[in-house]
Image (cartoon, rainbow, N blue to C red):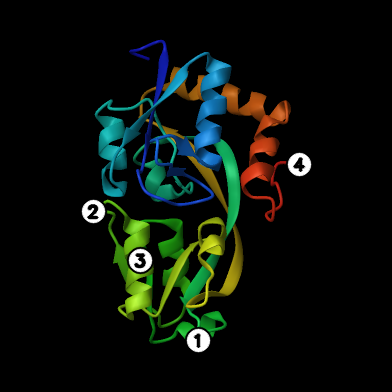
């Protein structure tokens, strides 16, 4: 790594609790923020946040703007062509969110409905599996692609959206609800640029260490106590 005192972590600068958000002082908090810090501690490096829009993650990683991408990246065949994934640091199911008054309650109810998901994501793969659903990709060109989907749902531009359960549970409110959850058990990993096997190995060792010493479990239970810890 170029700067041996820091671990440059590419991520999005948007509110997505309990995964990540910034407070009024600019400090980053949440499960993924703590995972990055734990990795840095094992490696003896301080974390430096590199904020990029969702659609710019992999170009920034390939250009060497960061050492590691850690920001809601479900491990998929497509994304594996863009970077090399670490072992998982999280496993989540996927949920479908609708407006509170919607009668959507099961996959069959999505036939003919407009279903949003982030483009080229595991969530979009699930949306495409719903028979006769009209899939609406959100490409991450804005500062807040997740917020764009929620706004589109609230405005009626889409009828439902798909995302991981951890992101949608905090959004349940008077006007939105989770219609159903699919037990897809999506594994999330951090990503390094192609051609960096030594960096990948070092980060995997760090992840193994924080699983073994219980620190990953502790931050999981701190931020997501209602979700079962997936690593034994």
Mark 3 or mark 4, whichever is nearer to me: 3
Q: Compared with residue 25, is residue 130 higher up or lower down, i.e. above or below?
A: below
Mark 2 or mark 1, whichever is nearer to me: 2
Looking at the rendered structure, the secondary structure element under dot 2 is: loop
Crowding near the residue tagged with mark 4, few <14, some 14–19, many ≥20 C-alpha atoms within 10 Å? few
Mark 2–mark 1 distance (CA, rounded to whole Å): 30 Å
Which percent across, then down, holds residue 56?
A: 26, 43
- The residue at the point 33 percent across, 27 percent down is 66
- Residue 232 is marked as 4
Looking at the rendered structure, the secondary structure element under dot 4 is: loop
Q: Do the residues labelled 2 and 4 touch (CB within 8 Å)?
A: no
Q: In the rendered image, which residue does mark 1 sit on?
A: 109
For residue 134, side relative to residue 175 (left or right): left
Looking at the rendered structure, the secondary structure element under dot 1 is: helix
Mark 3–mark 1 distance (CA, rounded to whole Å): 20 Å
Residue furthest top in the image? 4
- Quadrant in the picture for the N terminus: top left
- Residue 149 is marked as 3
Mark 3–mark 4 distance (CA, rounded to whole Å): 33 Å
Mark 2–mark 4 distance (CA, rounded to whole Å): 37 Å
Q: Compared with residue 68, is residue 57 higher up or lower down, i.e. above or below?
A: below
């Amino acid at each position: 790594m170029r700067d041996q005192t820091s671990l440059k972590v590419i991520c999005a600068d948007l509110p997505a609790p309990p995964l990540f958000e910034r407070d009024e002082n600019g400090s980053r908090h949440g499960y993924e923020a703590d995972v990055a810090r734990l990795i840095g501690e094992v490696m003896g490096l301080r974390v430096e946040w590199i904020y990029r829009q969702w659609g710019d993650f992999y170009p920034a990683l390939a250009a060497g703007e960061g050492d590691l991408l850690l920001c809601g990246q479900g491990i998929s065949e497509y994304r594996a062509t863009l970077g090399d994934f670490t072992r998982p640091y999280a496993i989540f199911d996927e949920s479908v969110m609708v407006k509170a008054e919607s009668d959507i309650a099961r996959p069959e109810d999505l036939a003919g409905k407009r279903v949003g998901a982030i483009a080229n994501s595991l969530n979009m793969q699930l949306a495409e599996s719903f028979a006769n659903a009209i899939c609406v990709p959100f490409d991450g060109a804005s500062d807040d692609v997740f917020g764009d989907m929620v706004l589109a749902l609230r405005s009626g531009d889409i009828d439902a959206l798909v995302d991981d359960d951890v992101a949608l549970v905090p959004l349940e409110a008077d006007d939105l609800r989770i219609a159903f959850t699919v037990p897809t058990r999506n594994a999330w990993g951090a990503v390094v640029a192609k051609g960096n096997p030594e960096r990948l190995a070092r980060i995997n060792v760090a992840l193994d260490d924080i699983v073994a010493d219980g620190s990953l479990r502790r931050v999981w239970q701190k931020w997501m106590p209602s979700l079962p810890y997936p690593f034994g």
